[in-house]
Amino acid sequence: MSIPSTRPYLPNRQILDKYINRIYDSGWLTNNGPLVNELTQRLEELFESDHILLVANGTLALQIAYQTLINSVDDQTSPIEAITTPFTFIATSNALKWEGITPIFTDINPTDWCLSANSIAEKINKNTQFIVPVHVFGNACPIEEINEIAEKYALKTIYDASHAFGIKYKGRNIVQYGDASIISFHATKLFHTVEGAMIRFKHKSDLAKAKEIINFGFNDNKEPCRLGINAKMNEFEAAVGLSILNDISDIIKERNNITAVYQDEFKNTPSVIKLNITNNSAYMPILLDSEATLLSTLKALKSHNIEAKRYFHPSLDTVEHLNPSNRCPISQDISTRILCLPIYNGLTTKEIKHICEIINHTINTHSIDNLDNNH
């Protein structure tokens, strides 16, 4: 038995073929084609949000959002800074650096693992332009507190909502918050377009600017009016997205059932500190009592051909090329003890029980060994 950490959801072939037939009939492969427009419209309806832009991938989505909302500075030697979290996938900060923006890391909350609002204000200075929080594993950031700080200091807020497809916060879809919000549609996500992503902008004018940026900087008159890049989603990616969107309710329902089995299997395991799992079941994270327990667990799973991921490790405030200026002890601690277990549509109850049996046995053995060593 071999169990990967994830397995991309493949849509019904007959439904996908109908969309692909439309591509062959039209001969339109890219450049804002009809399927991209249809997927945009359906996502706007699903998220109850206007101003959605589809792009080629999640990293580009971040870069486009930063580039769209950045303010030019008179003194070109002054750095532009963004306050962000060290507990996330590295693309969030790599995209900042790529755009010439310095990530300033602040620590996370120990309960939901999102950016702590309490630590933001002390890092703000004249160079700060952005706050870039991440809804980690789909857990909502402290949105009200972050927005209050952003308004007080006239900062733009860009939420990385890559894990938060379908999540609602206080009755509103979570992408409706902030000056911009991005969701990755990478193949490993519960909704995907193979590669791809979306940006939801608060303002129509920002959407218009971003549309020019992703099309080489051309305006509606086909004139190059600004610095641009090619970041458009193509029709085949949209076809996959439209096909999967038909199944999204069933996808999330099945993943919720998988999560429930995991939770039941771990209910009597004291070394597994559980997280309040979100209602999209995008990930199955467990927090263990020590890095030693985690490493033993990883080794045991690997010996049974079961893949688990250390999301997110290392804490980004320890990554040299990001030039971190301060340390975040909570993030560093959590990053050494967290493990994401396999979760994907088609994972069986038998397989989940097998995974949990190995983990529980390893934890119990590790605890006994520690007890013996202490004596």
Image: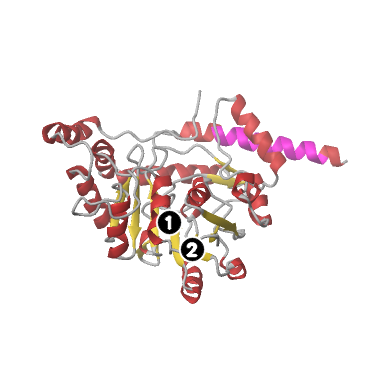
Give coordinates of residue 199: x percent, y percent.
35, 54
Provide the major secondary structure of the magenta segment: helix
Give coordinates of residue 49: x percent, y percent.
29, 61
**Residue at the location (62% across, 36% down)?**
359
Which residue type carries mark 2?
Answer: Phe
Examine the image and state in which quarter residue 373 appears: top right
- Horizontally, residue 269 falls left or right of residue 134, namely right
Position of residue 196 relative to residue 201, above or below, is above
Residue on which disc 2 sits: 130
Range of residues picked out in magenta: 355-371
Nearest the eye: 274 or 98:
98
Disc 2 + disc 1, Cβ < 8 Å: yes
Residue on which disc 1 sits: 66
Q: What colouring method underlies this structural image?
A: secondary structure
Which residue type carries mark 1?
Answer: Tyr
Give coordinates of residue 232: x percent, y percent.
30, 44
Position of residue 114 relative to residue 240, above or below, is below
Q: Residues within 10 Å of mark 1 (few under 14, many from 20)?
A: many
Position of residue 13 relative to residue 36, above or below, is above
Magenta segment: does it hold 118? no
Q: Is residue 256 visible?
A: no
